[in-house]
Image (tube, grey):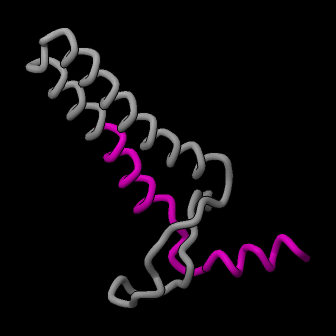
Amino acid sequence: MTEYWFARYKPGSMSQRGSRGLVPLNWKGRLTISTFVLGMVLGGVLMLVFGLRDQMQLGIPLFIVCAIAGGSFFLWASVAKTDPTKSIYDYREERQQ
């Protein structure tokens, strides 16, 4: 059985507005979000550092690589590790019992 990292607010097809939005279920989900944010911040810092050294031609590709790596990992996890049938409210009810 697959261990899910995220749950949706409401399960359903992607055309329903209520099915949008992911909530992390465990530390792996929170780490995935942190990895995405860290990739963006690291890319921005690298672009700033190389831009201040007049090497923007190196800073921009580094930012793009960091952003693509963080974004790709988040997109993969949001598709492969999201529970399609249960909402976050179902998980909260199970935890209370």
Give the residue furthest to the front.
Answer: 52
Magenta-tinted stretch: 69-97
Q: Is residue 44 magenta?
A: no
Image check: 28 left or right of 69?
A: right
Residue under the image location 69 percent in, 80 percent down: 89
Q: Position of residue 69 (x, y in %)?
A: 31, 37
Q: Quadrant of residue 85?
A: bottom right
Residue under the image location 36 percent in, 40 percent down: 70
Give the residue furthest to the right.
Answer: 97
| Quadrant position of the N terminus in the picture | bottom right
Q: Is residue 77 magenta?
A: yes
Residue under the image location 32 percent in, 46 percent down: 72
Q: Nearer the viewer, residue 86 or 56?
A: 56
Q: Quadrant of residue 73?
A: top left
Give the residue furthest to the left.
Answer: 57
Q: Nearer the viewer, residue 40 or 29?
A: 40
Q: What is the magenta segment's predominant secondary structure?
A: helix
Image check: 96 left or right of 6?
A: right
Q: Position of residue 30 (x, y in %)?
A: 60, 49
| Quadrant position of the C terminus in the picture | bottom right
Residue under the image location 36 percent in, 55 percent down: 75
